[in-house]
Amino acid sequence: MNQSPYSVLVVEDERWVRVVLREVLRETGLPFRIVQECTHGLEALDWLQSHTADIVLADVKMPVMDGVSFIERLAGLKESPSVVFISGYDDFQAARKALRCGVIDYLMKPVAAEELSLALGKWMKDREKKREIAQASSSAGAEEGHSEIMEQVLRLIHERPGHVSLAGLAAQVHMNASYLSQYFKQHTGRNFTDYVAGLRLEEAKMLIARTSLRISEIAERLGYSDIAYFSSTFKKTTGKSPLDFRRQEQVQRN
């Protein structure tokens, strides 16, 4: 019986490398199919908001958002795919950090079919083991209903902190908005507005420090229609304007 192919997302800024990866993946003969190609980490994160992939082949050094920053952000997704890093640089520090972040392998360009086959074959075996464990524990009872709903609400908030509302979330989980607000505070210890504001601030800090997006683009991405209000809110909380915060982070990273 033929096995359904696993889906692959390629994140690589150089077109010729993407072309080579398609051919190398075909040469492995393994059941993997490229479903999307992105040119940097932020584009890949945006695509993963509404799509899924089983595994990601990602470059380390890319414009806008590099591979390390990309994988650090994957944990917040509903279904976080496995990642194989591909690099043209023998960068020990990047490799060590990648492995700490959960990357399943770190391959050097040009990637050989044999190396990619070994990495993907190991991933397939590990996936099968996890599936067997999950089946063995399937008799465990489901969590209490409200806890499941709260987990869903928190996941939705973390996926798009700049574009959520209490009323919208309540409609999605089929719960009264007033009751959801009360239960949210009971569960998290914080009211809904403060919780979301905190997440938006952390997302803003990450995008300012880790990407080359303009401040206006970041404000729009986080749901702020007024850049002046965004800048004022950011400075009130951090003590620095967005541009000053970016300069400080660049100095520290260099």
Image (spheres, rainbow, N blue to C red):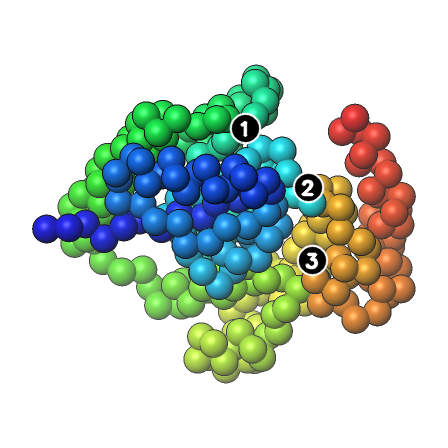
- In primary-sequence order, the first of circles 2 and 3 is 2
Is residue 239 visible in this depiction of the protein? no
Q: Amino acid at mark 2?
A: Pro
Q: Is residue 119 left or right of residue 3?
A: right
Residue 63: assigned label: 2
- In primary-sequence order, the first of circles 1 and 2 is 2
Label 2 close to label 3 by CB (< 8 Å): no
Q: Residue furthest left?
A: 1
Please report the residue visible at 84 percent of the width from the left and 43 percent of the height from the top: 245
Q: Amino acid at mark 1?
A: Ser
Residue 247 image position (x, y, % from top left)? 86, 38
10 vs 104: above or below: below
Q: Quadrant of residue 158?
A: bottom right
Mark 2 residue element: loop
Please report the residue visible at 71 percent of the width from the left and 67 percent of the height from the top: 223
Is residue 213 visible in this depiction of the protein? yes
For the residues labelled 1 and 2, the Cα–Cα distance comes to 14 Å
Query: What residue is pinned by disc 1?
Result: 87
Query: What residue is pinned by disc 3?
Result: 200
Residue 125: assigned label: none
50 vs 213: above or below: below
Q: How many marks?
A: 3
221 vs 103: above or below: below
136 vs 6, nearest the viewer:
6
Residue 65 image position (x, y, % from top left)? 65, 43
Mark 1 residue crowding within 10 angstroms, few (<14) / some (14–19) / many (20+): many
Mark 1 residue element: strand
Mark 3 residue element: helix
